[in-house]
């Protein structure tokens, strides 16, 4: 996928999250399937991963600093996101989701082609490129959107 196409696909989460503003509170906190996450949980999970990546990778690259990105325990991170979500309103979560994704988009778009294609090291010596990052997060977004959309259509 070309860089411009990847950035466009990456930005789709912004309009998707904005469309969730009209959702009633009961739907927002109902699991999309029995035993699964709520819409609130899914959106917060995405927002906090975006925020983590923004603060520990993208801003560090922008500022020419060493990355502080680490290979975290996903289960613990996700559980923390679910707990965090319980203390925030729907609008606060959606505002965070949109603003962080917009900032990620703006910063990644501003990188030179060289920076975009560079392979960077995590703090724990794993490697990634911005191209791989976008593709991974686009796929991640699509996975969760495919969970949410059928649920919303059934309401």
Image (cartoon, rainbow, N blue to C red):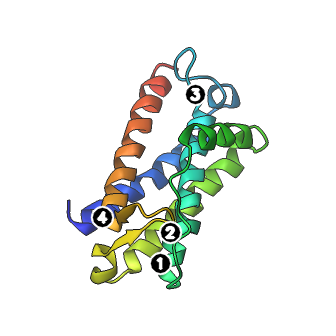
Rendered view: 55 above or below 62: above
The Cα–Cα distance between marks 1 and 2, rounded to whole angstroms, is 6 Å
Q: Mark number for residue 131?
A: 4
Work out whether mark 4 precedes mark 3 in sequence or the reverse, and give the earlier one: 3
Asked whether the beta carbons under mark 2 and mark 3 sit within 8 Å of each other, the answer is no
Q: Nearer the viewer, mark 2 or mark 3?
A: 2
Work out whether mark 4 precedes mark 2 in sequence or the reverse, and give the earlier one: 2
Rendered view: 114 above or below 80: below
Asked whether the beta carbons under mark 1 and mark 3 sit within 8 Å of each other, the answer is no
Residue neighbourhood size for the residue with mark 3, other residues' Cα within 10 Å, grouped as few (<14), some (14–19), many (≥20): some
Rendered view: 79 above or below 96: above
Work out whether mark 4 precedes mark 1 in sequence or the reverse, and give the earlier one: 1
Residue 104 x, y percent position in the rendering: 49, 67
The Cα–Cα distance between marks 4 and 2, rounded to whole angstroms, is 13 Å
Q: Which residue is mark 1?
A: 61
Asked whether the beta carbons under mark 1 and mark 2 sit within 8 Å of each other, the answer is yes
Residue 53 x, y percent position in the rendering: 52, 61
Rendered view: 115 above or below 26: below
Asked whether the beta carbons under mark 4 and mark 2 sit within 8 Å of each other, the answer is no
Please state, as top left, top right, bottom left or bottom right, where the N terminus lies in the image. bottom left
The Cα–Cα distance between marks 1 and 3, rounded to whole angstroms, is 33 Å
Asked whether the beta carbons under mark 4 and mark 1 sit within 8 Å of each other, the answer is no
Work out whether mark 1 precedes mark 3 in sequence or the reverse, and give the earlier one: 3
Residue at the far right: name it.
87
Q: Which residue is mark 2?
A: 57
Residue at the far top: name it.
34
Q: Element type at marker 3? A: loop
Work out whether mark 2 precedes mark 3 in sequence or the reverse, and give the earlier one: 3
Q: Element type at marker 4? A: helix
Residue beneath the point at 58% across and 33% down: 39
């Amino acid at each position: 996928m070309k860089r411009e196409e990847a950035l466009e696909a990456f930005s789709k989460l912004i309009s998707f999250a904005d469309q969730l503003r009209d959702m009633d509170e009961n739907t927002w906190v109902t699991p999309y399937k029995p035993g699964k996450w709520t819409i609130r949980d899914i959106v917060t999970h995405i927002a906090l991963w975006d925020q983590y990546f923004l603060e520990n990778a993208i801003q560090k690259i922008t500022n020419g600093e060493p990355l502080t990105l680490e290979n975290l325990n996903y289960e613990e991170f996700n559980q923390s996101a679910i707990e965090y979500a319980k203390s925030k309103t729907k609008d606060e979560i959606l505002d965070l989701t949109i603003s962080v994704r917009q900032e990620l988009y703006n910063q990644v778009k501003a990188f030179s082609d060289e920076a975009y294609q560079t392979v960077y090291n995590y703090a724990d010596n794993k490697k990634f490129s911005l191209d791989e990052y976008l593709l991974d997060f686009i796929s991640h977004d699509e996975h969760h959107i495919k969970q949410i959309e059928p649920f919303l259509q059934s309401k």
